Image (cartoon, rainbow, N blue to C red):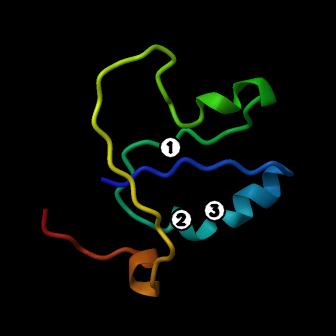
């Protein structure tokens, strides 16, 4: 599973244009995009506000090739 937490601080139409390639990736489980008041920007990553035990791992995604962008059949 891959989670993308994104923010664009500009006109919403421009932000939508920037996400066109991401929209081509099939199999989305959830999509909660929308205009967010500046006071709520901290909630984009759904980070807990209270301390809790956890283990996480993250990697920087530096790019996707053309095959990944249009989707392909996967055997899960």
The Cα atoms of the two marked residues, 2 and 1, are separated by: 11 Å
Residue 22: x %, y % from top left: 53, 65
Residue 11: x %, y % from top left: 86, 51
Residue 46: x %, y % from top left: 50, 30
Q: Are marks 3 and 2 in contact (CB under 8 Å)?
A: yes
Q: Residues within 10 Å of mark 3 (few under 14, many from 20)?
A: few
Residue displayed at 50% across by 76% down: 63
- Residue 43 left/right relative to 39: left
Q: Give the residue pinned by disc 3.
A: 19
Q: Give the residue pinned by disc 2.
A: 22
Q: Quadrant of residue 56?
A: top left
Depth check: give the residue in front, 67 or 52.
Answer: 52
* Quadrant, the C terminus: bottom left
Q: Quadrant of residue 42?
A: top right
Q: Secondary structure at mark 2?
A: helix
- The extreme right residue here reads 11
Q: Secondary structure at mark 3?
A: loop
């Amino acid at each position: 599973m891959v989670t993308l937490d994104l923010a664009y601080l500009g006109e919403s139409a421009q932000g939508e244009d920037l996400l066109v390639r991401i929209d081509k990736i099939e199999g989305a489980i959830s999509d909660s995009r929308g205009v967010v008041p500046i006071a709520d920007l901290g909630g984009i990553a759904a980070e807990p506000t209270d301390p809790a035990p956890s283990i996480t791992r993250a990697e920087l995604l530096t790019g996707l090739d053309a095959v990944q962008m249009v989707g392909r059949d996967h055997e899960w």
